[in-house]
Image (spheres, rainbow, N blue to C red):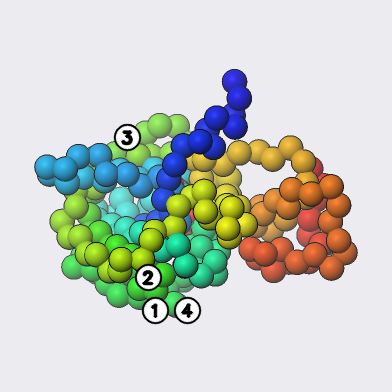
Amino acid sequence: MDSKALRKISYGVFIVSAAANEHKAGCVINTLEQVTSSPMKLSIALNKNNDTLRVIKEAGTFSAVVLKEEVELELIKLFGFFSSRDTNKFETIPYQQDKYNNPYPVEGIVAQFSCKLCDTLDVGSHIICIGEVTDANLISDDPPLTYADYHLKKGGSTPKNAPSYQEATMGYQCTVCGYIEESENLPDDFICPVCGKDASYFRKL
Ligand SMILES: Cc1cc2nc3c(=O)[nH]c(=O)nc-3n(C[C@H](O)[C@H](O)[C@H](O)COP(=O)(O)O)c2cc1C
């Protein structure tokens, strides 16, 4: 088994979100896909530990946005490396609410969908949620961010809760956010590009 083969699978980068009982939650995912066209349905895979899954189940609906290629890395950092359990991710960013009152970020996106949760499938660490699309909005003709470009151009990393997470075998890993710098040496003045911690927070792999 060569796990590098999995890196040949293409994905986009998205933020799914919902609100229930006055609590807002949202997270970055790369696992959104259109699965049927009539009625139009999307699937998303969410880690069982993610607060966003709990809130989507409570709300029975969710919003999904497609991130654009030029999205600020800060948005991915906020939604991909912190939990809505203890961080109100919508406090510091401009957002709107869809017809179900689910909040979604308005900057750095090219499309937005509102969905009714119509099915779930337990696949072990993750739950696949099927959403029927009840609203779809094209926001911009700018190109969407691909998962490959997130890694290549933006130097992004993927935390353990993502289904596509792969354990790195060499380099230095940030013990706070999981970012991996794949290099032989780590300079003393190195700063984590994702969470901003200094070199002392890194462990050699
Ligand atoms: C590029 C990227 C892709 C990710 N893909 C997924 C995914 O498909 N499913 C998932 O459950 N988590 C994924 N994650 C991890 C979640 O975004 C992360 O665990 C988040 O902190 C969960 O926040 P929450 O507790 O507020 O839901 C991804 C993160 C990044 C940065």
Of the numbered discs 3 and 1, the one sitting upstream in the chain is: 1
Of the numbered discs 2 and 3, the one sitting upstream in the chain is: 2
Q: In this figure, what is the number of numbered marks?
A: 4
Please state which amino acid type lies under the numbered disc 1. Answer: Pro
Left or right of 149 on screen, residue 13? left
Q: Viewer-proximal residue, 101 or 169?
A: 169
Left or right of 90 on screen, residue 18? left
The location of residue 58, given as percent across then percent down, is: 29, 54
Of the numbered discs 2 and 4, the one sitting upstream in the chain is: 4
Give the distance between the C-alpha atoms of the residues marked 2 and 4, in whole angstroms: 10 Å
Q: Viewer-proximal residue, 44 or 111?
A: 111
The location of residue 44, given as percent across then percent down, is: 35, 45
Residues at circles 4 and 1 in contact by the CB criterion of under 8 Å: no
The location of residue 23, given as percent across then percent down, is: 37, 67
Q: Secondary structure under badge 1?
A: loop
The location of residue 157, given as percent across then percent down, is: 60, 52
Read off the residue under disc 1. 94
